[in-house]
Amino acid sequence: MKLDQFLKVERKTTVAVPFPEDDAILKTCKTAADQDWASFLFIGNPETIEKAAANTGLKPGSYKCEKAENETEACALTARYIKEGKAQVAMKGQVHTGEFSRALFSKDAGLLEPGRLVSHMALCQVASYHKLLFLTDCAINIRPDYADKLRILDNAVDLAKRLGISRPKVGLVAPVETVNPKIDSTTDAEKLRREYDPQKALLGGPFGLDVALSAEAARIKKIESPVAGDVDILLFPELNSGNAVYKTLTVLAGATIAGLLIGLQAPVVLTSRADNAETKLLSLKLGLASV
Amino acid sequence: MKLDQFLKVERKTTVAVPFPEDDAILKTCKTAADQDWASFLFIGNPETIEKAAANTGLKPGSYKCEKAENETEACALTARYIKEGKAQVAMKGQVHTGEFSRALFSKDAGLLEPGRLVSHMALCQVASYHKLLFLTDCAINIRPDYADKLRILDNAVDLAKRLGISRPKVGLVAPVETVNPKIDSTTDAEKLRREYDPQKALLGGPFGLDVALSAEAARIKKIESPVAGDVDILLFPELNSGNAVYKTLTVLAGATIAGLLIGLQAPVVLTSRADNAETKLLSLKLGLASV
């Protein structure tokens, strides 16, 4: 399955972008506008925005501008427009990640419902695996405790469902399949597997990544689980491992990847400078498809 | 560079194997004996060993047998023969990993010098990277502290040197390149980089795996370091990430891989049931090449 075909934008929505005057960002917006997936609410200095948009070839009808004096105000307005329903997706423009995140994640912004947390979800297409693969959390939560893992899992299962996978198979990643009290990833995995609602998702683990991704490895290790070798979602125990696998897949396994922040009232597209144009566009499409 | 060509067995040594009567293990021994890389000291029941060895086609002159009543005794004898210099490499046979490890790693065995620790090193050949890649620790140390990381690094640098890489480039793996007091992997990486003897190895980091492995990613992220994009060794912050990347490389990136336990008086070959024949043989060759 191609990632691009899997993601279906079902209705046109509005994307709020603070300080969009960056060539790569505006090109991504132009492609989305040309496909009729989205219209844009650009926030910053209307004059410079309009000039940059015209240079990129973005049609005037595909966006509106709202004035903001500086980054802080532009990020705060982004959060407010989401809260008020004027935009359904937020995308980081040419602003600092810290500033952008603080504005959207803060309690004042009111975009985070009680009992939830913001997590990162990557969606990956790699030739060596027979399905698309969701990975979480590869970017935000440093060392989630059990309660955090439960919320990260809820976010992931909810997103998978919005994208059409109603009861995803989740592999709970650890270095080994046996529960070892010295290894948190194994004890938390066992607890999650026992306690998570099986109607929402089918959990397997603790699993080494070989068992999670290869039915042959599971057979050799005598692991019997419908999840082993067939996972839709990999839940990582902490940031070090999630981030390292994410980057291994892009740099060494030729993966095509999209990423999104989830758990807020609206999806947040926050691509990295090092992401290529395809990843930037797919990440926006992932956000639009999950509304 | 092919892993198989890189590893050069320079002198014939003796490998001690407790309970070798396993088809995959004996085939590995046969290939090594046929190449004249090693002779074997098999420990267990001489009758059953000789029968199994004959079935595999192992030439009688390529091995000796020593009697042991049970697993515990066979593992203890393995450690003793290493200590006495009768064998220079240990390889796990058909015995439990726990039993084997306890016998070799215990203080009584005397194979661990003061101030050292046992760590795992993987050596990986992957088409998408321009060098062979050492990964550590992917199998043993769960959550090494700073002092442990220093010892794991010493083990790795020492092994690389034995294999002909006199001043390896080491990438200190973390999720980000900026030092963040909330993320141990970044603070430990910075301390290692400052304190490690630059004559022994060239350290770079904290590095995300993209920066460690891709000069292009380093350029985009404006990281200037001779190590970025050109690492020989990846030092992982803990087992979850090292193990997950190791398995991602084998399952999803088509890597050829060899593994070894180092830090003891002799290298220890401890392959997993799920390893294929190529990995088993390359792991033994890695052990023999590093004596």
Image: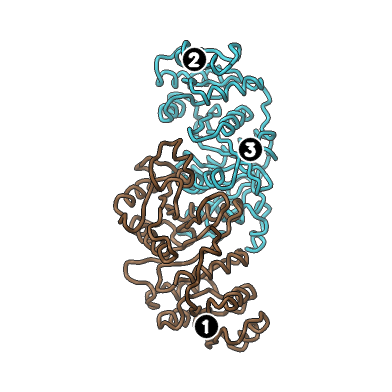
Chain colours: A cyan, B brown
Q: Which chain does tag 3 point to?
A: A
For disc 2, the marked residue is A49
Label at residue B41: 1
- Cα separation, mark 3 vs mark 2, equals 35 Å
The C terminus of chain B lies in which quarter of the figure? bottom left
Is any part of residue A23 visible from this angle?
A: yes
Q: Residue at x 67, y 42 (%)?
A: A167
Q: Residues within 10 Å of mark 2 (few under 14, many from 20)?
A: many
Label 1 chain ID: B
Q: Is residue B39 left or right of residue A130?
A: left
Height in image: B117 above or below B125? below
Q: Nearer the viewer, residue B276 or A241?
A: B276
Q: Secondary structure at mark 2?
A: helix
| Residue B91: percent from left, percent from top | 52, 74
Label 3 or label 1, whichever lies nearer to me, is 1
Q: Are the residues flagged by discs 3 and 1 from a single subunit?
A: no
**Residue A39: x %, y % from top left:** 60, 18
Left or right, B117 with reference to B54: left
In the drawing, does residue B112 fall left or right of residue A131? Answer: left
Residue A175 position in % (x across, y down)? 52, 56
Q: Which residue is mark 3?
A: A160
Q: Amino acid at mark 3?
A: Ala
Is residue A162 placed above or below B165 in the rendered structure?
above
- For residue A206, say whether it is visible: no
Q: Locate residue B35: give its quadrant.
A: bottom right
Whether residue A205 is situated above or below residue B106 in the rendered picture: above
